[in-house]
Structures are given as structure tokens and as C-alpha cells.
Image (cartoon, grey):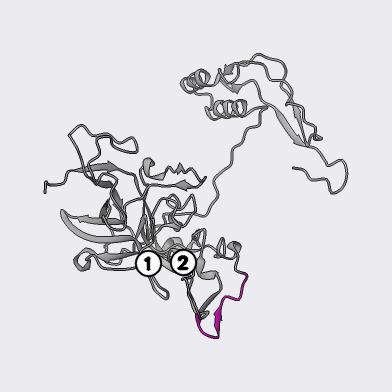
Amino acid sequence: MSPSTALIVPMDVAALCATTADNANRVTMTPPMADFSQLPQIPQLNETINLTPYLATTAMGATEPGPIPAGVHLHWALPAGLTVGKPNADGTMEFPLVPNRWLVSRFAIQNGTVTPDFVVIESDRLSPPPATLNGSMAPVTVPLPLPPNVTTPKYINYAYLGSMTPLKHWKETTSDRFKPLTAVGFGEQTFASFYPNCSSVFGFFDPAANLSSGQTLLYHVAGWYDGTDAVDPLAHAPSTLPYGWTCSDGPVDVTVLSGFIGGIVWDPEASNLSMTANELTAAIGSSTAEALSTLLANLAGGAPQTVAATKRCSMPCNCRCLGRPAKSSRPPEWSFTPPGSMPCRAAAAGYCNRWTAARRRPSRPGLPIW
């Protein structure tokens, strides 16, 4: 058997540091988009939990935002090729399998001393409730189908997804698995891209319990297919690589996803997050292009070199003088006062095509304004 040759596919890794000071400032985290533990359950005969309707709305958005756990939160982005589905002949979408094993390596550096730590994440492992997974993070739940030939109404129809084990204690074991594991998880298109959805699947929570203030942290994440429950797309060394991947060093038969983030200085007393809303800036135009070009010119602030660059990229959008907004069969709810019929051009103060918008009163009580 010839030795394997791996194709290393880069991926982005993001980190968020939260501290007890952030919790004192009432910084909260949005919960997962679905919590299937909120559905009605029958753990024992003659016992029912969650006497609520068995509807999707019961599980979706059922949990309120809560305090963000103190520590370092990692989230990695799957390569684009693994997030695009292909339509089948029957109208369904099929998404590529994604790696189900991840090695997270943490290197804590201080005064020339490097302290390593390693954790293995099994993204597809199912754990029955009750269980406490991934530190104090809200566990990721997935629905389970009712087993066939059930003769008694006794079942739990959800499980926790993902597990993490220190490398020194980890070994492959027989366990219930979530199959197929893809970027959309249980069918939610934002599953892999939204950290609370996948914090134990495509993310890692480091409670930082054994870290010292002032240590600089570097995290490296490597993912691979276990070959049993998730088959590597390069397992048979295809002559043409999938997903637009390229390699000039000959045939490859193993996929390894790799990403890292460093330069994180851990300070448990710092306040890193804020609930203060960012200032909102908006522009109104008779088309998206006109509104965008006006906004960009306004944001230029009159800097000559910036305005010149804005003029070059925005003039194609503003190739005509602004007229009135397009007519609609619906009574207008906004009145627009045009600046005049001046030609579109850039100036140090911004664009000349600025409109004044004011909302009109409804013509009769109760008339919707949108």
C-alpha cells in the first residue's frame, strides 16, 4: 500500500474573546436558531416534558439570548466548495460531506515559554440527553426520527451533536453518528456559518481556565474525514480534483483542512465586547446603484484622493440625471424633493444628486405605510 499524499485546503478561523467583565456589562449571545429539546418529549411512560404543540415554531427561536460564556470562542469557515449543493433529478439538493474530525491545537506563549494543548472534536457524534457538552456553551441539538416499530410511546426525539476530548484521552470508538454531516446540518442553510448553530461542530469553546493573564495565544485547526462515516472525496486519488481545488504536485488521496489564528493576548479582566449599537448610515435613491454611489461619495468626506476613486467607480452608476422615482400603482408613502436637473458629477462635498425624503401621512386612518 503506497503512502498517502494529503492536499492541505486552507480555511479561515475567527476568534472571539469574552470575559467576566463582558458579562458584567450584560453582553449576550444569540442562541442557536433551533433548540429541539423544546419539543414535546416522553422520557418515561406516563411522563411528558414540554406540553407544547409539536411544530417547527416550537423549536425555532424558542431560546432567549443569554450571557456569553467567558473564554475564547473559535469558529472556522468551511471552504466554499463544501458549502454548495447540487440539485438532484427529484428536485432535492445534495451537499458535499464535510470533515467530521478536527484537531484543535492551542499554544500559549509567555516569557519565551510555549505551553501546548490539544483537543479532538468529533463533529458527527450524537450524545443522548442529559449531557453537558462543550463547557458552559449551549449544546447543539438535532432532531431524531422516531424509530420504526415503536410499540410504546417512550422516546426522546433529539440528541446533542458534537463532542470534544483531550487528545491524550481520545480514540476512535463506536458511537451513534449524525449522517450525512454537511454544511447545512439538520437542514438549516446557515448552520455552518452561524457560530451558535455549530459551536460544537465547526467551532470550539476554550474556557481558558488554565490560562494566565498576558499569555499570547495561537490556535491551529486541522480537519479530516474519518473514512467510515464520512468518506474523503479524494480517497481514490481522482485525476480531476473536485470543488475547484488544484494541486501541481501529483495525485493526492487525503483531504486536510487547515487554518490558524494567532496574536490573541488573553486578559480575563478586559472588556472586549459591547452591546452599544453601531451608527446607522443610509442613502435613498431611485435605484440601488444611485443610492450606493451617493452613499460612497458621502462617506468619502471630501478627501480628494478618495473622491477621485469614488468618481471612477461610481460614475457608471450615475450616467444620467436623476428624475422622479418610478411610478407605482400604489399611492406613494414618501415624497422626494429632487436637487434639480444638474448633471451627475463628483465634487469635494460629495455628489450633487442628493434627495430630501419625507414620509407622507396615510390618506386615511389605518392605511399601512409600507
User: What segment carries the magenta color?
Assistant: 43-53
Specify whether residue 8 is painted magenta. Answer: no
Specify whether residue 52 is painted magenta. Answer: yes
> Viewer-nearest of labels 2 and 1?
2
Residue beneath disc 2:
144
Residue beneath disc 1:
126
Q: What residue type is labelled 1?
A: Leu
Mark before the other along the chain sequence, 2 or 1? 1
Q: Which residue is drawn at 64% across and 20% down?
A: 352
SS under mark 1: strand
Q: In this view, does 150 lie above or below 310?
A: below
The reply to whether residue 215 is in sight is no
- Quadrant of the rendering where the C terminus is positioned: top right
SS under mark 2: loop
- Local crowd size for mark 1, using a 10 Å CA cut-off: few (<14), some (14–19), many (≥20): some
The reply to whether residue 124 is in sight is yes
**Quarter of image, res 209:** bottom left
Q: In this view, does 370 lie above or below 267?
A: above
Mark 2–mark 1 contact, CB under 8 Å?
A: yes
x and y percentages locating residue 137 in the rendered image: 41, 65
